[in-house]
Image: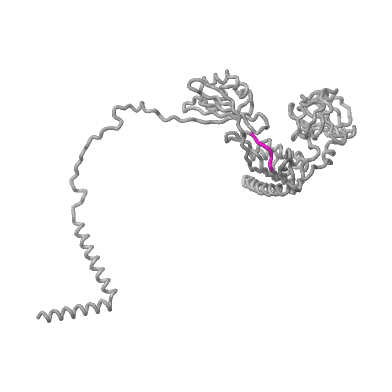
């Protein structure tokens, strides 16, 4: 009997083994179905349990001691903060008006500024100096700082007014300026200065650009709408803030389709630098095109009706319109032959140059040189005025060759240029010129993006 059951079980197992081997996928599907069905049943059974929402709820309360027990919130110190603001000093400023623009409400500070000698000498009555204030959150003055450049030495001065308790003190410090370069560019729509203003380029830079290309471009009559310019120039920073501008490092001007370029370069060992074209030719002429920066010619070298004598006579010089006090500069290197008062010229300066050339600067409001003094091209001789026979402020300029009057424009145009970059300095210049071309291209792209 037992042997028969064993044989039957063995036969059944052999049959199952053969079936699984012949139909593995069917067997797997059958087992999976059985498991899923069992799980569903289990789920169904589990679903028959009680709903948690219907179970009883118990509330329990426990007192928690306060961490700020016996303390009043007013006893805590509120976090303080400082306010900062910068402005430019105006010549008409009083301590109250300046502090008001700086957001300072501090009568004690205003009284101190009015009484302190260093403040009166270096801030009040000055124009254009940078001033910044640090105040408390209730607008009381903590520190006032005034910065300015006293000369061209590459340093600046810092006047500091600082609160110490309820008292104020002042001190003056010297520090070095930090030079960096900026790229800019613009498009001419009406005038050069309108375009530079639109591009936020300082007037001092615009004047330098006009001077650079004055021998090639007549900025009063030759500009065309759509002319473009690019410039790389120095900015001089004090405590991280731009304080003034330096020289133009490179510039490009496209006038009526013609491109003009200039690069500043100082040869190793040379006392001073100069501007050159990208191929190394000097842009410095023997004479400047004008004794007054970017002024307007009101009367040329020609016959005219004399404004005082009311008779027709030859005008043996060129008149430049400019406000009283505008600086007058020598158009070339030379020696002062005369500086004083002379008949209809009023205050006048005669400068003797080489080759028997003499230039005359008349109607000056003041004279800044003395006879026998050696001067360089661009050096200030005095200021525009209306002394002598003059109906208004202007500069009368003459050019004489061997005692004969000559048209200044023709002399300047015929004057030669200085020597080009030397062979020894040429590799260094070529590297600089290549770098400046890249920067000018970047400046041109900035100008184009702004215009678009």
Q: Quadrant of the N terminus?
A: bottom left
Q: Provide the major secondary structure of the magenta segment.
A: strand
Residue 38: which quarter of the image? bottom left
Residue 246 magenta-highlighted: yes
Q: Position of residue 415 (x, y in %)?
A: 83, 40
Is residue 26 left or right of 414 when viewed as pictured?
left
Given residues 303 and 283, the one toward you in this image is 283
Asked whether residue 210 appears in the rendered view, the answer is no
Residue 427 sits above or below residue 201 on the image: below
Residue 314: which quarter of the image? top right
Which segment did they paint magenta?
244-249
Given residues 155 and 104, the one toward you in this image is 155
Is residue 189 left or right of 5 when viewed as pictured?
right
The residue shown at (62%, 40%) is 180
Given residues 176 and 144, the one toward you in this image is 176
Residue 51 sits above or below residue 275 on the image: below
Residue 68: which quarter of the image? top left
The type of colouring in the image is: one colour
The residue shown at (62%, 34%) is 177
């Amino acid at each position: 009997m037992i042997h028969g059951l064993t044989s039957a079980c063995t036969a059944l197992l052999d049959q199952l083994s053969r079936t699984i081997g012949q139909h593995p996928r069917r067997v797997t599907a059958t087992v999976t179905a059985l498991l899923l069905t069992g799980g569903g049943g289990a789920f169904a059974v589990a679903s028959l349990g009680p709903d948690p929402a219907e179970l009883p709820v118990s509330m329990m309360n426990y007192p928690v001691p306060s961490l700020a027990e016996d303390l009043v919130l007013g006893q805590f110190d509120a976090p303080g903060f400082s306010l900062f603001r910068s402005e430019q000093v105006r010549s008409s400023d009083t301590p109250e008006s300046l502090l008001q623009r700086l957001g300072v409400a501090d009568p004690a500070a205003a009284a101190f500024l009015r009484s302190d000698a260093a403040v009166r000498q270096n801030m009040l009555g000055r124009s254009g100096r940078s001033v910044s204030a640090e105040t408390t959150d209730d607008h009381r003055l903590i520190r006032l700082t005034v910065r300015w450049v006293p000369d061209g030495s590459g340093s600046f001065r810092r006047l500091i007014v600082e609160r110490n308790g309820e008292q104020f003190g002042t001190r003056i410090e010297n520090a070095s300026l930090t030079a960096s370069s900026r790229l800019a560019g613009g498009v001419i729509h009406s005038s050069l200065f309108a375009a530079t203003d639109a591009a936020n380029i300082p007037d001092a830079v615009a004047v330098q650009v006009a001077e650079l290309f004055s021998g090639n471009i007549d900025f009063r009559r030759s500009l065309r709408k759509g002319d473009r310019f690019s410039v790389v120039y120095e900015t001089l920073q004090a405590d991280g803030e731009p304080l003034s501008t330096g020289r133009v490092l490179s510039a490009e001007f496209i006038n009526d389709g013609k491109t003009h370029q200039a690069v500043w370069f100082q040869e190793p060992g040379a006392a001073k630098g100069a501007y050159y074209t990208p191929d190394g030719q000097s842009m410095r002429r023997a004479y400047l095109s004008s004794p007054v920066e970017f002024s307007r010619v009101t009367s040329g070298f020609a016959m005219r009706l004399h404004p005082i004598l009311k008779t027709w006579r030859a005008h043996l010089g060129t008149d430049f319109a400019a406000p009283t006090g505008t600086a007058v500069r020598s158009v070339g290197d030379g020696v002062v032959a005369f500086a004083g008062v002379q008949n209809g010229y009023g205050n006048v300066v005669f400068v003797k140059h080489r080759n028997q050339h003499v230039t005359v600067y008349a109607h000056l409001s003041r004279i800044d040189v003395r006879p026998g003094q050696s001067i360089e091209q661009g050096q200030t001789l005095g200021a525009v005025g209306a002394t002598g026979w003059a109906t208004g402020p202007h500069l009368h300029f003459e050019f004489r060759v061997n005692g004969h009057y000559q048209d200044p424009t023709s002399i300047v145009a015929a004057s030669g240029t200085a020597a080009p970059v030397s062979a020894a300095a040429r590799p260094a210049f070529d590297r600089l010129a290549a770098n400046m071309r890249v920067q000018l291209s970047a400046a041109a792209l900035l100008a184009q993006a702004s215009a678009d």
